[in-house]
Image: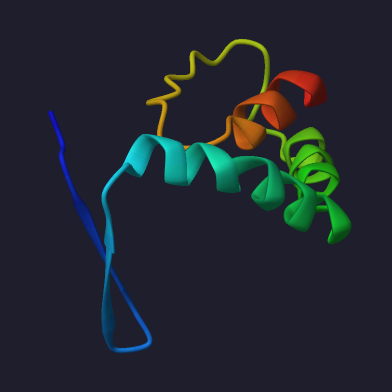
Amino acid sequence: MIKRVWLFELGREVRISEPKKHFAAHADAYVRYISVFLYPQGCRAFFADVPWIGSHLRVLDAGCGTGIITFALLEAH
């Protein structure tokens, strides 16, 4: 079990004693941030326009993010 996570931002070390709580608290802010720039909609439009991406593909979502790209792909096809 991870007890502590170190983040390196702007050349300084930041220690996080409860990483799960830290990243969970920031996930909603991240989704709001990328939504302002219409990132999910842009991804969806891209996937809809690319001819070699279609419903015949199988996709593995490795669980390394919010799932926005996976949902955009599903909604495009």
Residue 12 drawn at (x, y percent): 28, 84
Observer able to see residue 65: yes
Q: Nearer the viewer, residue 16 or 26?
A: 16
In the visual, does 26 lie left or right of 2? right
Residue 67 drawn at (x, y percent): 58, 30
Q: Nearer the viewer, residue 69 or 18?
A: 18
Q: Specify the quadrant that holds the C terminus.
A: top right
Q: Specify the quadrant that holds the N terminus.
A: top left
The residue sitting at 77% across, 43% down in the picture is: 40
Q: Quadrant of residue 25?
A: top right
Residue 5 drawn at (x, y percent): 22, 53
Q: Quadrant of residue 19?
A: top left
Observer able to see residue 52: no
Where 59 falls versus 16 (above or below)?
above
Residue 45 drawn at (x, y percent): 84, 42
Question: In the current view of this chain or complex, which residue is farthest to the bottom?
Answer: 11
Q: Nearer the viewer, residue 11 or 45?
A: 11
Where 47 falls versus 58 (above or below)?
below
Colouring used for the render: rainbow
Where 9 falls versus 44 (above or below)?
below
